[in-house]
Image (tube, helix red, strand yellow):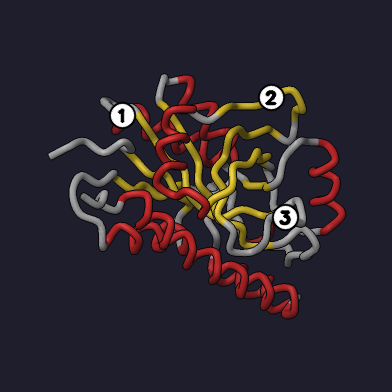
Amino acid sequence: MAKTQVDVILVPQGAEYRAVCRGLVACVGALPQVRAIPVGSEPVRRFLDQWHCTQGEGIESVLLMGVCGSLVPQCQVGDGVLYQCCWASLSRGRVRQSDRTLTEWIQTRLGAEVALVSGVSCDRIITTVAEKQQLAQQFPVAVVDMEGFTAFECLQQWQIRAAMVRVVSDQVDQPLPDLSPALSASGQMQPVPLALQLLRQPRRSLTLIQGSLRALQKLQHLTAQIFRPLQE
């Protein structure tokens, strides 16, 4: 059986992880492992350090997947994006490039279903339109996430090729409910605090939920497209 171009998929735990797993169900042949990662920079760093020590032997390529927020009007809810590079929000000079060969392979699989973009990773949830606009002014980027830069940094340190595919779940002009109180120090979303935060801002929460459902459906679809068998 031919070896897949991707050894491991890393995707945030919960709904994003389940969407990726559903996308792989219909695929056949050599498929990558799927690992659920915590949310946030430092939890991801701790997870990857442990993962590399215990399960990283022989891993050559990793695909990061998940959802992201838009920082420009051109990126709409449900749009797929393929990262060319990822910036660290805490330091304007720190940027990590995705692996060119792996990124080009994914682009051939997805074609027009994804746009090539640059992204920025933040260590907290961005909730206001003003914060989104500020990031777009500070960095030459189109989307924001919470794990990409740290994951790229760790994987490249270990000579592991890395690429990233995400789907937009909220638009640049869309304020979000503040979910920070529901996020534990270990990067876990706690169900009861999460529900309470969503109830405090119902209109914002409803829009976020609707956008997330669209993004998760697209994430599942893109996963299936990447790993579908090539037509003879």
Identify the residue at horizontal 80%, vertical 62% (top origin). Answer: 173
From the viewer's perspective, is residue 146 above or below residue 76? above
C-alpha span from label 3 to label 2: 25 Å
Identify the residue at horizontal 62%, vertical 62% (top origin). Answer: 169
Ranked by sequence position, the earlier of labels 2 and 1 is 1
Of residue 128 and residue 80, the one placed in the foreground of this image is: 80
Identify the residue at horizontal 69%, vertical 53% (top origin). Answer: 125
Q: Which residue is mark 2?
A: 94
Mark 3 lies on a secondary structure that is loop
Ranked by sequence position, the earlier of labels 3 and 2 is 3
From the viewer's perspective, is residue 151 above or below residue 134? above
Of residue 210 and residue 27, the one placed in the foreground of this image is: 27
Classify residue 49 as left or right of residue 41: left
Classify residue 102 as left or right of residue 119: left
**Location of residue 50 in the rendering, given as x and y in whole percent from the top left corner:** 39, 33
For residue 74, the mark is 3
Identify the residue at horizontal 37%, vertical 34% (top origin). Answer: 51
Of residue 177 and residue 134, the one placed in the foreground of this image is: 134
Q: Residues within 10 Å of mark 3 (few under 14, many from 20)?
A: few
Name the amino acid, label 2.
Answer: Arg
**Location of residue 99 in the rendering, given as x and y in whole percent from the top left corner:** 48, 28
**Residue at the left extreme, as displayed:** 1
Name the amino acid, label 3.
Answer: Gln
C-alpha span from label 3 to label 1: 35 Å
Q: Residues within 10 Å of mark 1 (few under 14, many from 20)?
A: some
Q: Which residue is mark 1?
A: 59
